[in-house]
Image (tube, rainbow, N blue to C red):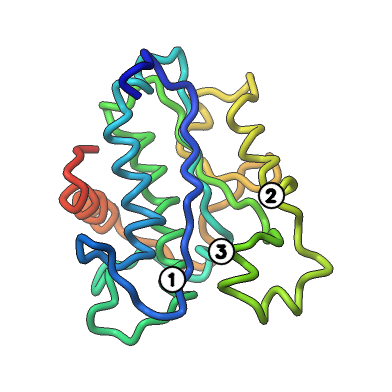
Amino acid sequence: ARRQSRLDVLINNAGLLLNEREVSPDGIEMSLAVNVLAGHMLIGLLLPLLKNAPQARVINVSSGGMYAVGLRTQDRQYEQEPYDGVRAYAHTKRAQVVLTELYAEHPGTEGILFFSMHPGWADTAGVQRSLPTFRMLTRPILRTAEQGADTILWLAVHQDLDKRHNGTFWFDRRIRPTHRLKSTTNSAAEREQFLEYCNQLTGVNL
């Protein structure tokens, strides 16, 4: 990054689904650390380079699994509640969508386009490792990794995207709703509190 004057596209695609609770060397629950905080910190650290690009784009790779849950507002790292890896993963994917919307509204990110997206269920090494039963049952309809990446690449380069699309959630090159159930919505205060929580854990200010 020190050798570059600008960054046109940042794709946050690192993802982790664990069957048992683990913590990072910093003591942070791993799915939160990898799926949410790593991308949040990257955006904060690379913000000067992103702002130097004519219209930089940040793409957060989420998951349709987020439709089942709202933003986790208590016990965010499963220190009290029994750990459920699939649910923890879904909560982090919801968090990515919420943060994407908040990044788009932040006055310090003017000129940058933020998108979140669902790649579809793809037959990747992560699915094979973390969801073997799911893979066995759905393998005939799973996408290839290349098919899953299609919308990511399209969002990165499509010329007709502009500030009207900032903060939106995509699947198969189309904007999609971020909620299917009313119970998964959160208040503006809860959303802002989560953003500040991420800022505190990473040391960036978004």
Q: CA distance from mark 1 to mark 2?
A: 28 Å
Please name the amino acid that badge 3 sits on: Arg
Q: Please, which residue is most extreme toward the bottom here?
A: 82
Quadrant containing the C terminus is top left
Please name the amino acid that badge 2 sits on: Gly
User: Please, what secondary structure does the residue beneath circle 3 have?
Assistant: loop
Q: Earlier in the sequence, mark 1 or mark 2?
A: 2
Residue 183's mark? 1
How crowded is the residue under tag 1: few (<14 C-alpha within 10 Å), some, or many (20+)?
few
To which residue does mark 3 refer?
Answer: 180
Vertically, is 46 above or below 14? above
Q: CA distance from mark 3 to mark 1?
A: 9 Å
x then y, percent, for residue 142 = 76, 63
Residue 25's mark? none
Residue drawn at the location 60% of the way across and 33% of the way down:
155
**Picture quarter containing residue 22?**
bottom left
Q: Earlier in the sequence, mark 2 or mark 3?
A: 2
User: Please, what secondary structure does the residue beneath circle 1 have?
Assistant: helix
Residue drawn at the location 19% of the way across and 50% of the way down:
196
Q: Is residue 6 left or right of residue 150?
A: left
Residue drawn at the location 67% of the way across and 41% of the way down:
174
Count numbered badges in the picture. Answer: 3
x then y, percent, for residue 86 = 49, 75
To which residue does mark 2 refer?
Answer: 148
| Closer to us: 53 or 163 | 53
